[in-house]
Image (cartoon, rainbow, N blue to C red):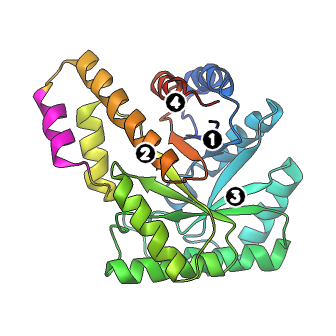
Amino acid sequence: MGLPLSFEFFPPKTPEGAEKLRVVRQKLYAAKPEFCSVTYGAGGSTQQGTFDTVKEILAEGVDAASHFSCIGATKASVREQLAMLKAMGVKRLVALRGDLPSGYGMGGEFQYASDLVAFIREETGRDFHIEVAAYPEVHPQAKSPEADLKAYATKVKAGADSAITQYFYSADAYCRFVDDARKLGADVPVVPGIMPITSSSQLLRFSDACGAEVPRWVRLRLQGYGDDIESIKAFGLDVVTELCDRLRKAGAPSLHFYTMNQSVATLEIVNRLQLG
């Protein structure tokens, strides 16, 4: 049973990184993704790199979504960037508030992602398919789970077409989030964000920073493998494939893979699921 797929990359920082990512993308295109998205650094610090990578993906014949954050942006700067993306042929945006660069006050004319979504809709009508972020396990900076759900519903009502979640390893958390969001009238498709497990220290560090829960049994198993990379990878493939299978059975509309600019683990999971 096919399920649409999408892949996320971050903009490479060096010419070698860019070359490596071209090779990775070609391998992943074998799975026929619906689109590929490219992230944006804190405060838009990688903006040029993001737009350059988006341009390359489009030239390779694949739909590309640009991350688009509004921290520190003005309406004039956003208007200009929207025109540039439209001219490039971009049809999808992932609209985010964005991370604050360290030592940075709020600034800019947009306080929340919902303000950005509303502005994009106002300025460009239906030119872009707008994705927003969703947090099945609650945004790390949210005042409460209720406040977080309300903020999500506000983004959807401002004009979002669909949402992509922060990664998670609990299918129950995803299902509960989708149900709760629907009760608030936010009924756009919610696409699970999937993070393959290829390294234990990186995953645990990452997850603590962004508020993603690594279940205790997974954490303990990973720690138990110590430096045994092969066992970590094999275990990670089993855990994430099973998660994807549960999400598929629960009715997830598609799967969005955080590839970390690598292809091996993502392709192995896709093959095991017989997707793509």
The vertical placement of 97 against 194, above or below, is below
Q: Earlier in the sequence, mark 3 or mark 4?
A: 3
The label number, if any, that marks residue 93 in the structure image? 3
Could you tell me how far apart the alpha carbons at marks 3 and 2 are, in whole angstroms?
Answer: 28 Å
The label number, if any, that marks residue 246 in the structure image? 2
Q: Nearer the viewer, residue 184 or 132?
A: 184
Could you tell me how far apart the alpha carbons at marks 2 and 4 are, in whole angstroms?
Answer: 11 Å
- SS of the residue at dot 2? helix
Rendered residue at 50%/52% (across/down): 192
Q: Quadrant of the N terminus?
A: top right
Would residue 101 be visible to someone looking at this image? no
Q: Earlier in the sequence, mark 2 or mark 4?
A: 2
Could you tell me how far apart the alpha carbons at marks 1 and 2 are, in whole angstroms?
Answer: 13 Å
Q: How many marks?
A: 4
- SS of the residue at dot 1? loop
Q: Quick one: label 4, few (<14), some, or many (20+) residues within 10 Å?
A: some
The amino acid sitting under disc 4 is: Leu
Q: Nearer the viewer, residue 4 or 122?
A: 4
The vertical placement of 129 against 23, above or below, is below
- Dot 4 corresponds to which residue? 273
The vertical placement of 233 against 185, above or below, is above
Boundaries of the magenta span: 214-224
